[in-house]
Amino acid sequence: MAKNILNPGSALGEAIGVYMEVALNRYLTEILEDLTCHLISKGGTNQKTGKEKKLLLYDKHGTGYNIDAVITDEDMKPLILVEYKYIRYKKHNRDKGSWVCTAHSAVRRRYTSIRSSIAILAGNWSKTSLTMMVSHDINIFLIPFDRITELLAKHGIVFDWDEKDRNTAVSSWGAYEALSEDERLRIAEEMILIIKDDLKRAILQTLDDTVMREVKKIVIEIHTNLGEVLTFEFSDAEEAVKFLSDFGLDDILNPDDAIAIFDGAPSGEDGEILTFEDE
């Protein structure tokens, strides 16, 4: 049966991702048992087909994004966005990482009740992609590729084959396909052991309503009729108000202060400059 699969490597990766999602949904449900919150991972049932609909959250422009799971309050207002992503090859980092950044940022601008974005990532994720997601205020929980390889090896399944090695991919998919449902789920549950404690701690801290709210940052974004976009950040309201009271478009649009394309890249917090070009 395995030889009839057009892409056995992708089939195996997809199956691992599916069971990881099942294991994580079960664990998140356990965390929320004693709270007045819910884990929602489906958008209800299609009355015509009887199939479960995707969970779609919309941005301000009506574009729907399929979010893997959402933790809501008892009134179904979203509090935490949860994304599950597995990739085998780093060449997919940019597409999948960028999608998470775009989707979560857009959705959070509409649903003001959202407190946190979480991405649980398994497989080969590059430092560049992780840094990009963190810069979009996404909390990362990482399950390394080596961890998955070790767990599958215990079942006689080779997982670290070369990208062009179809024969190993076929045999590995066949071996995985021969596992029982319980065995596949146990592998997924062992996969997520590495992140469970940190994940639980982060979720409970985010949902803690005893924490007093305070302003962390104020961002003012200015769009001109010619298309320029300027962003200013302030640590408190007093600074932001002072900026607006002294506001002058000619001053902040001084062409001498504009950045040219070869002026170089800003460095990160550790002084390192990251790029996607090598992925």
Image: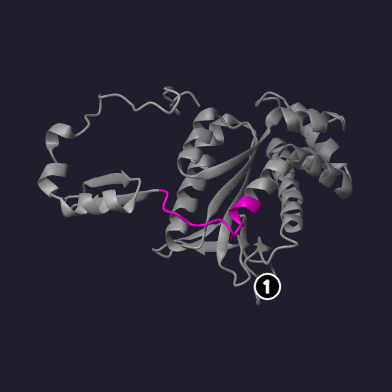
Task: Judge whether residue 208 is colored magenta.
Answer: yes
> Along the line of sight, which residue is nearer the eye, 163 or 147?
147
Q: Residue furthest bottom?
A: 47
Relative to 2, is 36 on the left or the right?
Answer: left
Q: Which residue appears at 74% of the width and 30% of the height? A: 147
Residue 6 against residue 209 in the figure, above or below:
above
Q: Name the residue that disc number 1 marks.
A: 49
* Label 1 element class: loop
Q: Position of residue 114 (x, y in %)?
A: 52, 59
Where on the picture, by quarter, is residue 241? bottom left
Q: Position of residue 9 (x, y in %)?
A: 70, 35
Q: Position of residue 100 (x, y in %)?
A: 52, 47
> Total number of numbered labels?
1
Relative to 145, is 172 on the left or the right?
Answer: right
Q: Which residue appears at 33% of the width and 26% of the height? A: 265
Task: Judge whether residue 30 is colored magenta.
Answer: no
Residue 98 against residue 213 in the figure, above or below:
above
Identified by mark 1, the residue type is Thr
Residue 171 can be seen in this image: no
Q: Position of residue 273 (x, y in %)?
A: 41, 24
The colouring scheme, among rainbow, by chain, secondary structure or one colour, is: one colour
Residue 40 can be seen in this image: yes
Q: Which residue appears at 59% of the width and 59% of the height? A: 210
Point out the stretch of residues depicted in magenta: 204-216
The rendered magenta stretch, by its main secondary structure, is classed as loop
Q: Residues within 10 Å of mark 1 (few under 14, many from 20)?
A: few
Residue 56 against residue 186 in the figure, above or below:
below
Residue 194 against residue 66 in the figure, above or below:
above
> Along the line of sight, which residue is nearer the eye, 249 or 36?
36
Q: Quadrant of the N terminus?
A: top right
